[in-house]
Image: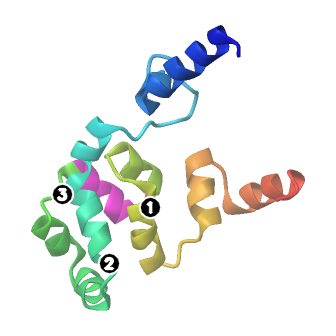
Amino acid sequence: MNVASESTIEETHKLLPTDFLHHDLPIPGTYIFDGEAAMKGYNLNKMCFSFNSAENRAEFQKDEDAYCRKYGLNDEQRKAIRERNVLAMIHAGGCIYYLAKFAGIFGLTVQDVGAQQRGISVEEFKKMLKAQDR
């Protein structure tokens, strides 16, 4: 039995997933959704989660600004909602999994959101995916 390898395995099992995060190493064009972003976007994400209910979607569509105020969205978040700018919502603390609920109300597809995130048209985004055989 190799004692050194057993020790290394033992040490590795003591590591937490957070030990592998390197927030100081930026990835160009990437926005990290961490605890700070989650707190910043709590109201936005809570509102988007509410869209699981058809009744809530109808209430939102009846008066978007009132619905945003009901959930306490800040000016940055309300502007992103008005502009249907998913990337701005992400920067305002939105979690893409909750924002998908919002996007669905307006028939925005994954390609629409991906194009916004890349800053290109939907057609350019589709061509890019096709070129990568996806």
Foreground of the two, 22 or 59: 22
Q: Which residue is mark 3?
A: 73
Q: Which residue is mark 1?
A: 97
Asked which colour scheme the image uses, the reply is rainbow
Residue type pointed to by label 2 = Phe
Residue at x 46%, y 50% (from the top left corner): 87
> Could you classify mark 2 by the number of other residues whose Cα lies within 10 Å: few (under 14), some (14-19), or many (20 or more)?
many
> Could you classify mark 3 by the number of other residues whose Cα lies within 10 Å: few (under 14), some (14-19), or many (20 or more)?
many
Residue at x 32%, y 46% (from the top left corner): 92
Q: Position of residue 5 (x, y in %)?
A: 66, 14
Res 51 label: 2
Disc 2 is placed on an element classified as loop
Q: Nearer the viewer, mark 3 or mark 1?
A: 1
> The N terminus lies in which quarter of the figure?
top right
Foreground of the two, 130 or 15: 15
Disc 1 is placed on an element classified as helix
* Residue 119 visible in the snapshot: no
User: In terms of secondary structure, what is the magenta stretch mainly?
Assistant: helix
Q: CA distance from mark 3 to mark 2?
A: 15 Å
